[in-house]
Amino acid sequence: MFNTHNRPRIMLATACLLVASIGSLPSVAQTKRSPVAPNRERVEAAVREAYEKFRSDTNGKNADYIPYLAQVDSKMFGIAVVTTDNQVVTLGDVNYSFSIQSISKVFTLALAMGELGPDKVFEKIGSEPTGRPFNSPLAVVDMPTHTGNPLVNAGAIATTSLIPGRNAAEKWNKILDFYSRAAGEKLVLIDEVYKSEAATNTGNKALSYLLAKYDRIYADPFESVDIYTKQCSVGVNATQLARMGATLANNGINPATGEQVIKSEDIPHILSTMTMAGLYDGSGGWAWRVGLPAKSGVGGGIVAIAPGKGAIAVFAPPLDEAGNSVKAQEVIDYVAQQLNYNLYSPSSVGLK
Ligand code: DON
């Protein structure tokens, strides 16, 4: 059987095997492969189909209350999936750095819990949906906790105010460093976004003083708003955002670097908060349709987390009335269905 005539074929087969095994050499993260991480071909197909299906949807409108955001090209569209075993699947405008905006709130919450413990954060901020727009002063007045939850502006500014540090610069550096560790790459501030937002954020300043009236802000109100404005102006591309999400999906361990960035015991608190309030007054409908914790930002990004499996990040600037990217919602909904990600569906963990 192994005659000379077959030798080239045998050599070719051996070479193929070698390439295949090199391709699957375990990286830091793959040595702890999640048993539920999805198969790459399925992810690629779902991403490709979603991109084609929704690329020409022109619904929604760029945020314009932050002047910089109104100028961003509305046609940009990028999808990135990072799995817990660090497979990366991307399509479209995935290298453009957009402002993380409200998605930052998730990671400042994670940092605050790491620094103070989850109980303290729950006591100081709470975790109740407001049922109101993300920047609502009425929610601050109405809610028994006043802060509502860490993902609306008031609760987020209060969460930022909890970050310990000797001065504003130290607090800010701690936040930026933490985001970078979650992304697995050094992230930077987009200075024009920061300046544009800092010049127009009177509403957030008002929220910070309203919180002070109820003793629900824990550092200087305007200093806290300034640090919060910087955190919202951090630039991420879709791939970096997906990796930040995959860190949450992977029990707090960055799948690319292997670093435990977020304590695993904090993850359920973060993901449940995202489920209740991640898409603000659109969160109920989102949970009903998609069944995944997610967070949106007015920069046009949304990241959704499939615990144990991975994260889907989409960047597309036009937003709906609640401030959530229209195309990002459509894509995540579609990809999550194709990959059977809905947390509330027992079939997502293999039950037939
Ligand atoms: O404070 C603000 O209004 C913005 N920096 C962030 C708001 C935001 O991203 C809401 N998201 N969908």
Image: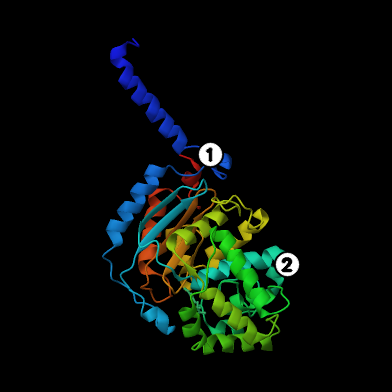
Q: Residue at x 28, y 70 (%)?
A: 58
The kind of secondary structure element at disc 2 is helix
Label 1 to label 2: alpha-carbon separation: 35 Å
Question: For residue 126, which numbered disc appears in the image?
Answer: none
Q: Quadrant of the C terminus?
A: top left
Dot 1 and dot 2 residues touching (CB under 8 Å): no
Camera-nearest residue between 246 and 183:
183
The quadrant where residue 186 appears: bottom right
**Residue 153 in sight here:** no
Kind of element beneath mark 1:
loop
* Residue 169 percent across, percent down from the top left: 65, 77
Residue placed at 48% from the left, 73% from the top? Answer: 281
Please determine whether, in this image, residue 245 is positioned above or below residue 174.
above
Query: Looking at the image, which residue is at 35% across and 65% down?
Result: 327
Asked if residue 172 shows in the view, the reply is yes
Q: Where is residue 343 in the image (x, y as percent from the top left)?
A: 50, 52
Image: 117 above or below 40: below
In the picture of the structure, the residue carrying the numbered disc 2 is 116
* Residue nearest the viewer, comparing 301 with 134: 301
Amino acid carrying mark 2 in the image: Leu
Between 162 and 330, which is closer to the camera in this rendering? Answer: 162
Earlier-in-chain disc, 1 versus 2: 1
Q: Which residue lies furthest to the left in this view?
A: 56
Residue marked by disc 1: 26
The 10 Å Cα crowd at callout 2, few under 14, some 14 to 19, many 20 or more, is few
Name which residue type carries label 1. Answer: Pro
266 vs 3, left or right, is right
Across and down, in percent, residue 11 comes to 36, 22
